[in-house]
Amino acid sequence: MFSKLLIANRGEIAVRIIRACKEMGISTVAVYSEADRDALHVSLADESVCIGPARVQDSYLNMAAILSAAAATGAQAIHPGYGLLSENARFAELCKECRIAFIGPDSRLISLLGDKERARDTMQKAGVPVVPGAGLVPDGETAQKEAEAIGFPLLIKARAGGGGRGIRLVRSMEEVLPAFSAAYAEAQSAFGDGACYMEKFLSPVKHIEMQILCDQHGNVVCLGERECSMQRKNQKLLEESPSPAVSPQLREKMMEASVRAAKAVGYQNAGTIEYLVDREGNFYFMEMNTRLQVEHPVTEMVTDIDLVKWQIRIAAGLPLDFSQKDISISSHAIECRINAEDPEHNFTPSCGKISLLHIPGGPWVRFDTALYQEYSVPPFYDSMLGKLIVRAKTREEAIRKMQAALCELVIEGVHHTAELQMDLLSEEAFLQGTYTTDFLSKRGVSC
Ligand code: ADP
Ligand code: ADP
Ligand code: MG
């Protein structure tokens, strides 16, 4: 096992990883930008290294500075968290060259699956159903031709896309050319790669994803699904597991397809396979995320499996000590993302000093955050302030527990989304479990 690990991330996920390391007896190195000197992950780690100015390009995406920090402190492994460098194949490759273990799959898998169009093609060949659509479209003219075959509405999607960006909805032939140019330009500026592919726009659908863990010895285990259909602008707001809309038969089919998908690519470490599921129970592969997911605690709560610890153990070469038959889920977990955004003003990001903080407690209530009282939320980074997660025996009890926990949560000094989450919990479609990805836009929330 590693004796020292560097966390190439910030915020709640850096704190989450440091906690796992502490429990495993691994010492930790935090890296931080000049804007993050007072950040919680810096004070919780055993050592810390400043890696540059506030801008992520100069700090948290600065591969040379991060690798130098690892070399200088003698860290044997790097955990990239999510976002930032977590899906950067070049970074994984550089770690390998520096003989530092990258906590995640190898660069080959990151490149293959990070290219959403190639991933789609690979999964189709492995017999996993994919969303009907077309491969790469090199120009607007080809896009128009393909659009005729796919039919409207459809989506133009960046192959390098992520975080809900690089996706354009097209409703008619007239919209194809402008949408293609817009998607191309957005993807080029956001990901440095403008290439796009096309998919039929399925609606109404649920976003259901499967968590998998694969060790270096060929063991593959699927830890069930997460329902992530509560979205705004293609970004998740609330997640739960199990999904109220997935029958035992559908779950079995999706788990089987996910294990097959993981085996087809020789996957290693933790990964998530995202699917769209229609009303008839047909499911379609959308993409695979080769990293820890923001909403991983939902799975941890219902399986009692610590995903971060297992990511580290797998990278150290340890075999999984459980198999598929040990996974049985008999409780329900819900997560609400609390973002520093103002729902009253079109979700504009909010920053400032936390003047009052009260974190809810009680049995099976977890708040993953890097906040503390008097902390100043900087304007440079992701707007997520924390994730409130609860677990209970039944979905009804989990909803009540979440309502009580949200009531108790106090974060003053910035605008945030806790009240919006409270409203969502009492919506009929949520209570029924029938909500689909278009729920918020239909409700009139700007999407
Ligand atoms: P999850 O599926 O884990 O919920 P999200 O899509 O919400 O993941 O993204 C997690 C984080 O990673 C967010 O901070 C998002 O902005 C960022 N992110 C995801 N993909 C990319 C990408 N390709 N490039 C840059 N940032 C990304
Ligand atoms: P990202 O890489 O940004 O996470 P995804 O491909 O996972 O992008 O899609 C993000 C969200 O966009 C999905 O959760 C879903 O709500 C919506 N979406 C993506 N593809 C489709 C599709 N073909 N039909 C309907 N909705 C889609
Ligand atoms: Mg996705």
Image (tube, rainbow, N blue to C red):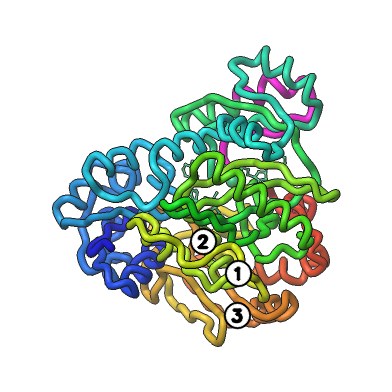
The answer to whether the residue labelled 2 contacts the one labelled 3, judged by CB atoms less than 8 Å apart, is no
Which one is in front, 289 or 37?
Answer: 289
Question: Which is nearer the eye, 241 or 261?
Answer: 261
Q: Nearer the viewer, mark 2 or mark 3?
A: 3
Amino acid, disc 2? Ala
Mark seen at residue 418: 1
Q: Is residue 170 magenta?
A: yes
Looking at the image, which residue sits at the far left? 72
Q: Quadrant of the N terminus?
A: bottom left
The one nearer the camera, 273 or 339, is 273
Instruction: Mark 3 and mark 1 in contact? Answer it, CB < 8 Å.
Output: no
Residue 69 belongs to magenta span: no
Q: Is 136 placed left or right of 291 in the picture?
A: right
443 sits to left or right of 329: right
Element class at badge 3 = helix
From what the image shows, is residue 65 above or below residue 431?
A: above
Q: Residue at x 58, y 67 (%)?
A: 298
Q: Which residues are magenta?
A: 164-181
Q: Which residue is mark 2?
A: 340
Tell whether circle 2 marks a residue whose Cβ is less than 8 angstroms from ligand 1. no
Marks 3 and 1, Cα distance to the nearest angstrom? Answer: 10 Å
Q: Position of 72 compared to 438: left or right? A: left
Residue placed farthest to the bottom in the image? Answer: 362
User: What kind of residue is marked 3?
Assistant: Ala
User: Residue 342: which numbered mark, if any?
Assistant: none
| Ligand 2 visible in quadrant | top right
Residue displayed at 28% across by 72% down: 25
Give the quarter of the image for residue 74: bottom left
Query: Marks 2 and 3, how far apart in space?
Result: 18 Å
Residue positioned 30% across, 53% down in the render: 78
N-term mark: 3 or 1: 3
> Which residue is label 3 attached to?
405
